[in-house]
Each structure stands twice: as structure tokens, then as C-alpha cells.
């Protein structure tokens, strides 16, 4: 795979001289390999290969080629650089598997380049203006005129979500196309702000359900995926600027401390989950001798976690460690970010010591990623449903100079999800 960038020489380039190229649109150094580059010189009618005839330096803002050929390149020559990208050409993949292999579905690892997305621009599609429910803009009378005047609509650098803000309660509707040129429509809830779920490559129209003022419409930080991704577990690796991001630990441990008086009174220890996942185990540690022990149970949002009950024996000594695990796979083990987790000592406890509690939570696949992933929507499409292929919000806020890419495991890399909602 490769991308092409070109320039016309203002002066001759001799052996050892340099040529500066701009990065192709929506790319930066992290998008490209260190090898596989080619240089075409029209005046020589020749294709030069790296590293025999030139070397390449991928800089922060441009690409520098050092020419090592023996024949000078004259002024006015047009030179094109094919900048190599790791991986095979689009569409080149294994398409079959030996029929003698039973119970096997062919999967493929694909690299998805999301480009070097520009910084979010809150009024990139619509500068601050008034808009009536009849479609009259304060900048231009009609939507078509506003687009012609450059006051409405536009093309995003990469497919990304739309954001908007306005004064006066209304439902905002955005019309445009996705990165494949398919028409799509998305609407907000009734209110004064909007952070879209779908990703648009172009915006061609904006309407409101009632008159609003000071309307701005622009780009957000959610980037559209070019193929359907239904689960975060399909994302094998995340890269920023050519560097692989560290995957978050698959487990986290919440710790709490129940004072003796609380234990004796049967008063719950209250914790709040900072992650989404499933409770896998609860462990207790006695800080002193337990006179009369009992069971410690766990509730999430007021619902008892099935099968989980840590029993602390009568006369358990200081440092006694006890633990229990819930019923594997039971729905009550699930926790979301912000969920209340209650650690509940039975009323039987009497004359007890303080007790330390450790709650082990196994993170969901999405929580293990550095960026934020939202799966492609599989429900019947409407103006309010999510992106049909899925979105990815980079770990580092887009700045126009950081390349984002993902390695995905998929069994059908050509599946683009459900048809877009077109109104």
C-alpha cells in the first residue's frame, strides 16, 4: 500500500541534494513505513527505488528525500513520491481455507488507518447564525444559498461525528454523506446542544424543529470506522503516531475498610465502580480477632450478586483471609462506570475487628483500550441510532499531526454494517 505526494522543483537537485514533500492529506509520519518508497522523476522518465537512489526522512511536518542519483534533476521537473504503508494492497487477502479443517472460520487481521484527524472545530460546518424552522438562515435565506456562501455545509477531513450548540429548545437534524458517499441523517434530542453518534464525511443540510439563534455546527472527536466492528475484543492493538499504545490491565481491584463499629452494626461499606466489567472475586482480611463472625454479601445497585458470600469464621484470628467468587457469567456480576457497590456484613457479627475488603473486577474489552470504542449499531436504523460501523475516539485528542490506526480481527472485512438512515 502507498500514498502519493508530489512537488515541482524550483531549482535543480544534484546528487546529495534534498527535496521536500508535504504529507498526503490526513496523514503524518506515523502512517508510513520506513521502507518501500519510490520516486518518479518526469524529466528523467525514470522510477527510482529506495534506498539505492534516495533516502527518506519522515519529519514532524514534512518528508525530506535525499537524492543519491548520478544525474542531476533539472529545475521545473515534477517529482512524485510513493510513500509506502505497511501491509498488502486493499483487497489482497486470504479468501479460502483448507476444506479439511473442521469447525473453522477464516479470520483476518486488518490494519485500519484513521488518518491524522484535525483538531475538532465546533463551527466548521456552520458559523454562528440564526435558523428558523422554515429553513431561513440569518447569513443566507435558504440552505442552498448558505452552502454557496460558505456559511453552511462542508467536507470533514475524515469521517467523524457532528457537534452543535444553539439558543432556544429545538430538535436539530443533520443531513450529509458517509465516507462511502451514502446519504445519512441524524437528529438530536430536544434541547440546546448535540454530540452526534454517527460519523459524517460531508454535511449538506441542517434544519431545526423551531426557531433558534446563535447556531454553530462543527466536528467532534469520534472517528468513523470504515468497516463494521461489533465488539471491542476485535481490536487487537491501537497505534498513535506509529507507536503501539499500552493496553489497560484486564483487572482492577477496589479496596475498602469497614470499621469495627460498622461491622457490628451491619452497616454497609459503599464503593463506586470506576470501570465497566464484572465482579470476579471478593476477599476480606481481618484486622484483629473476630469474636462472632458471619457472612459478607455484595449488592450492585441494590441487587444481590448471585452466589457471592464471604464467610468469616467465629474466632478468626488477625490476618485471616477469606474469599468467595460469584456464579460465573451471572448477570448480577456486571458493573458499569459509577455503579454503587455495597459490601454488607451480616447482623450476626459481634465484637469484631476492622475488616479490609478487596473487590476484583474484570474489565470489559472496551475498558482495556486506551481510546474509546463504540460498537457498530445493529438495531433498526433511525435518526437517533448510533453509527452503523462503529466509532473510535483516540486516546490523544486529535491535533492534525498524530496518525491513528487500529489492528482488527474480523471474519468479514468487507461487511460495512446496516444501510445508513437516509430519512
Image (cartoon, grey):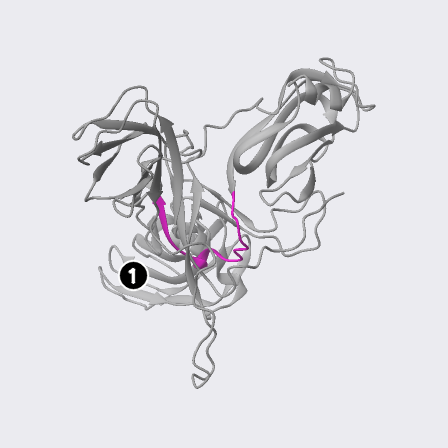
Quadrant of residue 206 within the rendered picture: top right
Q: Nearer the viewer, residue 314 or 322?
A: 322
Q: Position of residue 189 (x, y in %)?
A: 70, 35
Q: In the rendered image, which residue does mark 1 sit on?
A: 290
Q: Position of residue 191 (x, y in %)?
A: 70, 29
Q: Residue furthest right?
A: 134
Q: Secondary structure at mark 1?
A: loop
Q: Residue at x 68, y 42 (%)?
A: 184
Decide: is 227 above or below 151: below
Q: Residue at x 38, y 32 (%)?
A: 6
Q: Nearer the viewer, residue 296 or 33?
A: 33
Q: Residue at x 46, y 71 (%)?
A: 106
- Look at the image and give the residue range highlighted in magenta: 224-239
Q: Residues within 10 Å of mark 1 (few under 14, many from 20)?
A: many
**In the image, is residue 162 part of the stretch drawn in magenta?**
no
Decide: is 108 above or below 42: below
**In the image, is residue 230 part of the stretch drawn in magenta?**
yes
Q: Position of residue 80 (x, y in %)?
A: 36, 35
Amino acid at each position: 500500500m502507498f500514498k502519493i505526494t508530489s512537488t515541482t522543483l524550483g531549482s535543480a537537485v544534484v546528487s546529495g541534494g534534498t527535496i521536500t514533500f508535504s504529507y498526503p492529506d490526513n496523514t503524518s509520519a506515523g502512517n508510513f513505513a520506513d521502507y518501500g518508497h519510490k520516486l518518479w522523476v518526469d524529466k528523467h522518465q525514470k522510477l527510482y527505488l529506495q534506498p539505492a537512489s534516495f533516502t527518506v526522512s519522515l519529519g514532524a511536518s514534512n518528508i525530506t528525500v535525499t537524492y543519491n542519483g548520478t544525474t542531476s534533476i533539472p529545475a521545473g521537473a515534477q517529482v512524485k513520491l510513493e510513500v509506502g504503508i505497511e501491509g498488502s494492497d486493499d483487497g489482497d487477502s486470504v479468501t479460502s481455507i483448507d476444506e479439511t479443517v473442521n469447525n473453522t472460520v477464516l479470520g483476518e487481521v486488518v490494519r485500519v488507518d484513521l488518518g491524522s484527524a484535525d483538531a475538532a472545530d465546533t463551527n466548521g460546518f456552520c458559523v454562528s447564525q440564526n435558523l428558523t424552522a422554515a429553513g431561513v438562515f440569518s447569513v443566507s435565506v435558504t440552505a442552498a444559498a448558505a452552502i454557496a456562501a460558505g456559511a453552511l455545509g462542508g467536507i470533514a477531513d475524515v469521517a467523524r461525528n457532528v457537534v452543535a450548540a444553539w439558543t432556544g429548545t429545538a430538535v436539530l437534524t443533520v443531513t450529509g454523506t458517509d465516507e462511502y458517499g451514502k446519504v445519512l441523517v441524524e437528529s438530536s434530542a430536544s434541547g440546546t446542544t448535540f454530540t452526534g453518534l454517527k460519523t459524517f464525511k460531508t454535511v449538506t443540510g441542517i434544519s431545526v424543529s423551531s426557531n433558534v439563534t446563535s447556531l454553530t455546527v462543527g466536528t467532534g472527536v469520534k472517528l468513523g470506522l470504515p468497516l463494521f466492528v461489533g465488539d471491542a475484543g476485535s481490536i487487537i492493538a491501537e497505534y498513535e503516531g506509529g507507536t503501539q499504545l499500552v493496553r489497560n490491565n484486564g483487572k482492577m481491584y477496589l479496596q475498602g475498610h469497614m470499621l469495627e463499629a460498622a461491622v457490628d452494626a451491619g452497616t454497609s461499606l459503599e464503593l463506586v465502580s470506576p470501570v465497566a466489567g464484572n465482579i470476579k472475586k471478593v476477599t476480606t482480611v481481618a484486622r484483629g480477632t473476630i469474636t462472632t463472625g458471619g457472612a459478607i454479601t455484595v449488592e450492585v445497585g441494590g441487587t444481590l450478586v448471585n452466589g457471592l458470600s464471604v464467610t468469616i469464621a467465629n474466632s478468626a484470628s488477625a490476618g485471616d483471609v477469606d474469599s468467595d467468587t460469584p456464579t460465573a457469567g451471572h448477570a448480577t456480576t456486571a458493573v458499569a462506570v459509577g455503579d454503587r457497590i455495597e459490601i454488607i456484613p451480616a447482623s450476626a457479627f459481634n465484637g469484631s475487628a476492622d475488616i479490609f475488603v478487596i473487590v476484583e473486577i474484570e474489565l470489559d474489552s472496551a475498558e482495556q483500550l486506551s481510546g474509546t470504542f463504540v460498537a457498530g449499531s445493529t438495531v433498526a436504523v433511525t435518526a437517533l441510532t448510533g453509527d452503523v460501523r462503529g466509532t473510535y475516539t483516540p486516546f490523544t485528542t486529535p491535533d492534525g499531526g498524530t496518525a491513528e490506526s487500529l489492528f482488527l480481527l474480523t471474519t468479514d472485512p468487507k461487511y460495512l454494517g446496516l444501510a445508513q438512515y437516509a430519512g
